[in-house]
Amino acid sequence: MTVKEFKIKNITSARLFLPIVSLILVLIINMIKTPNFFNITIQNGVFYGYIIDVINRASELVILAVGMTLVVASSGGTDISVGAVCALAGAVACFILAGGEVSTDVYRAPYITAFIAAIFVGLLCGSFNAFLVAKMNIQPMVATLILFTAGRGMAQLVTNGQITYIRVESFKMLGNSIHGIPLPTPVFVALAVVLITLIILKKTALGLYIETVGINNKAARLVGLNPVYIQFIAYAFCGLLAGLAGMIVSSRVYSADANNAGLNIELDAILAVALGGNSLAGGKFSLLGSVIGAYTIQALTTTLYAMSVSADQLPVYKAIVVVIIVSLQSKEFIKIIRGFNLNKKKAEVAHER
Amino acid sequence: MKDKLKNIDNKTFLLYITILLFIIMYGIGIIMFGSKGFQKPQVFLNLFISNAGLIVIATGMTMVIISGGIDISVGSFVALTCMVLAYLMEKVKMNALSAIVLVIIIGLIFGLIQGILISYLNIQPFIVTLAGMFFARGMTAIISQEMISITNETFLSWANKKITIPLFGIVNKKGAVVYPYIYPTVIVALIILVLMFIMLRYTKFGRSVYAVGGNEQSALLLGLNVKKIKLQVYILNGLLCSIGGFLFCLNTCAGFVEQAKGFEMEAIAAAVIGGTLLTGGVGNVFGSLFGVLIKGTIEAFVSFQGTLSSWWTKIIIAAILAFFIILQSILAMSKRGKK
Amino acid sequence: MLLTPFEVIMDNLLKMRGICKNFPGVKALDNVDFNLNKGEIHALMGENGAGKSTLIKVLTGVEEFETGQIILEGKKSIINKSPKEAQENGISTVYQEVNLCPNISVAENLFLDREPRKFGLIDWQKMNRMSKELLDKLDIKIDVTKPTESYSIAIQQMIAIARAVDMSAKVLILDEPTSSLDEGEVEKLFLLMKKLKNDGIGIIFVTHFLEQVYAVCDKITVLRNGALVGEFEVNNLPRVQLVAKMMGKDFNDLENIKSESTQTTGKEVLLSTKSLGSNGNIKPFDLKLNKGEVIGITGLLGSGRSELVRAIYGADKTDTGQIVFKNKEVKITAPIDAMKLGMAYLPENRKDEGIIADLSVRENIIIAMQAKQGIFKLIPRKKQEEFVDKYIEILQIKTAGRETPIKQLSGGNQQKVILARWLLTNPELLILDEPTRGIDVGTKTEIQKLVLKLATEGMSVIFISSEIEEMIRTCQRMVVMRDKKKVGELKSDEISQNNIMSAIAGGE
C-alpha cells in the first residue's frame, strides 16, 4: 500500500466522513439547482432564505435523531413509533389548551401544563417501549410497532377526530419565531437539545455505558453495568424528545393534526442515524454525525420539493438511500466485494504467469 | 394444577386462548348487540368478506414469522397493488386480467428484492421491510396522488358477484326469505389458506421453513440451504401480498395513497394472536385466521356500537398485540429459566 | 484374534495425515495425524486450545486446512467443503449443543431434507413409522411425533446419532456429548455407542471425562498446543499418565516445582462460602479464602471450575447458600454487587465476555472503575489517560495508542488490558479464569509474576488454569473440581503434579 492510499483510507474511515460528504454533496446539488440557495435576506428583522428554511425545518428531525441515535446504539434496534408519539403529544397538549374545544382563541389552561403534559406523554410512550424492549426482551421494531399504529389512533381519540386549533400568538412562538429574534425558535430548541445531550454525554458516563451495552451485553454486565437500565434510559429519553418534537410540530401549524403531525419522520430519523455514519447494529455512535445527517436529509427533502416531488412521494427516494447505506454496511456485501477483488487479483496473477 | 398446565405445550396454549377469546368476544357481541342483529349469520360471514385480503396477507406473514423474519411492508404494498390495478385499468385502459397478472409479477419482484437483501446480504428484515414500506407507499403517491375509482366492468362484476348460501335463510320485513351470501374473494382467500396450510405441513419446503425458524444454525448443519429457503419465503410472501392486495381492492374498488394504513400491524397481530411465535419456528395459518376473525369482531363491535370512532379498532388491536407479545415473552423466559 | 496385514488395511476407515492449519498468529494444527478403524471408539483428548475442535472442524468441512490429506477407507482422498459434503462422504457429527431444530417433531428432525413422500407431499404416517423403526432398532423408545425440545439433551443426542446412522455414516464424531448428561443417560449413550461399534461404525469421541474414556474407548489420541502427542491403546495408558500427556510434561521426569514465592498468608479470612450452589451449574460448595492468599481451582474443562467463581461473583444466578465477605454476610445478585465489595473477575471467554471490541484501549480499561463509581461521576479525561498510561507501562501493553480499538490488539495484549481494567478497581479479591489461555509464553510468565506480586501486597487471588505447572508455580492451595462438584483441597505441601493429577483423574 502506498503512502497516499494509506492517507486516503485514513480520511475515509474517519467517523464524520460519510455525513459531511453527503451534506456537501446535497448542498452542491442544491446550489446548482437553485442558485439563490445560499442567499439570505432580512425582512422585518428576521432572516429569510432557503438555507434558513432548511435549518429551521430540520429542527424536529434533529431532536428525534438525537433520541434515535441513543436507541440504536444501545440496542441495535430502532424506535419506529416516534412520529406517532409526536402526534399524540401534540394532540394532548392542544386538547389541554383548548379545554376540549375544536378551536380556541385563548388558553383554557396554562401553557406550561400543556407543555409538561406533552413531554410526559412522550416519556410515558418511551417508557412503554423501553419496558417491552429492555425488560421483556422483545425485538425493538415489533415493540415500537404497537405505538407506531396505535399512537395516531389515540391522538385521534384525544382530538375527537378533528384538527384542534390553538389560535393564540404565544402558542406559535415555539414553532415559528419570537418577535425581535432573527431566527426561528425551533432552531434554538434543536440546538439546545443537541447541546444538553452532548453535555450529558460529556459530563456523565452515559455515552460510554450505552456503547458498552450496545457492543457487548454480556461483558457489560460483568463489568458492573445493568443493560436493562441503560436501554430503558435510551428508549425513555427518545420518547421524551418525541414529545418535545410533537410540541414544535403543533406549534408550527398552531394545531394538532393527528393524521399528519410527524408523518414519516421515523424513517427520516433512522436515515439520519445511518447517514451519520452510525451502524444500525448498535455500538459506537456519533451524535454529531446523526445531527449532520438530519440536516442533510432536510436539505435533500427541500431539494426534492424544489424538484416538485410531493411530500407523500418523498419516502421512495429516502427508502432507496436507506437500502443503499445498510447494504454498504452489510458484512456480507463487503465479503462479496472483497471476493470480487480477490478473484480479480487471482485472475491478474494467473494472467501474468 | 401446575402439572396440568405443563402438559399443554406453549403453542397449543396460545392457540386455545385465541379460539376462546374469539368465542367469548363473539358471544359478548351477540348479547350486547343482539337487538341490532349481531347474531345473524350474515354478520359472521361479513367477517370473512371484509377481511378476505387480510386473511391471505396474514397467512403470508405467518410464514415469514415462522421462518424467523418479519415483513412490515405489507400494508403499503397493498396500497401499491390497489393503485397499480386502478391505474392500469382506468388510465391505461388495460383489461382486468392482464392488470392482475402484472400486479402479481410486481409482487414477486418486490419479494425477490426484499428477500435478496435479507437472506444474501444478511440485513435485518425489519430495516429492509421498513424501507420497503416507505418505498411502496411513496410509489403509490408517485403513480397518483388522487384517488382512482375503478369502473372497469369485468373487475366490478367480480367484485359484486354475490354467492348466496342456501342455508340459514332469514325472513325479512317484507316476508321474503333472504339467504346469507359471500363474495368470490372469500372463496379465494379460503382456498389460499388451505393451500398454505398444506404447503407448510406437507411439503419439504414448508417443513424447512419451520426448521430454519427454529434454529438457523442447526438447519444449516442438517443440510438445508438456509439462504435459499429464506429467499423463497419472501418471494412467496410477495406473491401472497399481491393476491391479498387484489382481494382487498375488490372490496374497495379504488386506489388511493392512504389505503390499508396500519395493515402490517393487523397482519402481524393476526399471526401473533393466532399463536405464531415472533421468535420463529412455531405457528399455524389457521391460528392466524382466528386472529383475523378477532380483529373483524372488534371492527364489528365498533360499527354496531355506532358512536365509537373507528380508531378504537386500531387501539384495541394494538393492546391485544401488546398483551400477546408480553405473554409470549413471559412464556419464553420461563422456559429459559427451566433450562 | 489374529489379523492378517491385509485385514488390518481393510479395517482402516479414516486416515488424516500431516494436517496443518493456521489462524492469524496461531498454529492451530501442526502436522497432525489421526487414524480411525472400523468398529473402533477412539477418544480425542486435549485441554483447551489443544486443537481438538479444529481437527474436527477440518474433518467435517467447517474449516479449510492448508496442507495434509484426509483418506477415507484407504483409497479416496477427500476434502470436505461443508458439513453437508462431509455427511455425503459418510462423516457425521453430533455436537454437545445438539444441532437439531427444537421446534419440529423428532421424526422430522430424523428425516429433514429427505422426507418420505407420496404424490409429492410428505407422507407423515410413513415418516413416523420409519422413525419409530429406526429408533426401536437403537433401543430408543420415545414418541416421535412430539416436538424435539420436549426431550432431554440426552435423548436429543441419541436422535442426532440415529439420524447420522440412518444417513449411512461410517465415521461418527461425538463432540463432548456427555457434558450435560447424568450418569444413567451416559450409560444409555454408551450402550448405543457399543452397538454402533459392533455394526462397524468408527466413532471419534471427544470428551473431558476420563472415566468415560476408560469405560468405552479402544484408543486415545492426545493433542496439545495444536500438535500430536501420540496415539495410545487405552489399556496401556493409566489415567494419571493420560492427564500428564494432556497437560504437558511427563510427570515422571518432572521434579515437583515448589512455589517460587515466599510470601506468608495472613490468617484473616477474606471470603467464605457456605453451600453456595446453583441448579444445574454447580453443586453446593464451601470455600474459604484468606487475605493475600492465592488459591487455584483445578479440574478439567466442564468440571465446574468456572461455574464456581461465577457463582461467587454473581455472574450466574445462585439458588442456595451464603457468602461471607470480610466477616459480613453479603448478598450478591449481580456483578456490580461483587465489585462494590472489592471483587474483580476476568472471565474465561475473552472475546464474548471480556473485551468490548469496538471500544478503545482507554475505554476498556476504565469501564469497570467507571461502573463502580456510578454514571454521574465521570472520571475526568486527564485522569483516565493517566490511569491508562500507567497500566500500559506497568503491564507493558503493546498498543499503537490509548485510543486504538481493543479488537486490533493481539490476544495477549487484550488480556492485559482486561487485567488492567480490574487492577484499576483496586480489588481485594481478584478472580482470574484462564487468564493465560491462547497467550504467548512471555506474557504468561508476566501474568504469573504479577499475580504473585499482587498477593504479597495483600490481594487475594483465585486462579484457574488448564496448565498445572502454572498453577503449581502460583498457588498456595488448590481446590479440585470434578463433575461440577468440589471434590477436595490440596494444601501447599501436598501440591505436586502427581497429586493434582490423581486428584483430577479421580478413581484408581
Image (cartoon, grey):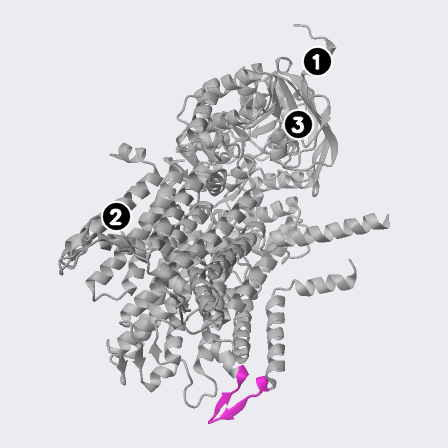
**To which chain does the residue with label 3 belong?**
C
Image point (30%, 51%), residue name: B293
- Would residue C218 be found to the left or right of residue B172 on screen? right
**Three-letter residue code for mark 1:** Val
Kindly tell me whether residue B220 is visible in this rendering: yes
**Three-letter residue code for mark 3:** Leu
Residue contact at pointers 1 and 3, CB within 8 angstroms: no
Which residue in the structure is indicated by mark 3?
A: C223
Kindly tell me whether residue B260 is visible in this rendering: no
The nearer-to-camera label among 1 and 3 is 1
- Would residue C178 be found to the left or right of residue B318 on screen? right
**To which chain does the residue with label 2 belong?**
B
Q: Quadrant of residue C194?
A: top right
- The quarter of the picture where the N terminus of chain B appears is top left
Q: Earlier in the sequence, mark 1 or mark 3?
A: 1
Q: Nearer the viewer, residue B276 or C433?
A: B276
Which residue in the structure is indicated by mark 2?
A: B21
Label 1: which secondary element = helix
**To which chain does the residue with label 1 belong?**
C
Q: CA distance from mark 1 to mark 3?
A: 25 Å
Q: Which residues are magenta?
A: A36-51
Image point (24%, 80%), residue name: A108
Q: Answer few, some or many: residues within 10 Å of disc 1's Cα (few below 14, many 20 plus, some between 14 and 19).
A: few
Which residue in the structure is indicated by mark 1?
A: C8
Q: Answer few, some or many: residues within 10 Å of disc 2's Cα (few below 14, many 20 plus, some between 14 and 19).
A: some
- The quarter of the picture where the C terminus of chain B appears is top left
* Image x and y of residue C418, in percent: 58, 47
Q: CA distance from mark 1 to mark 2?
A: 69 Å
Q: Nearer the viewer, residue C355 or C62?
A: C62
**Three-letter residue code for mark 2:** Leu
- Residue A42, magenta (yes or no): yes
Residue C94's place in the image compared with A135, above or below, is above
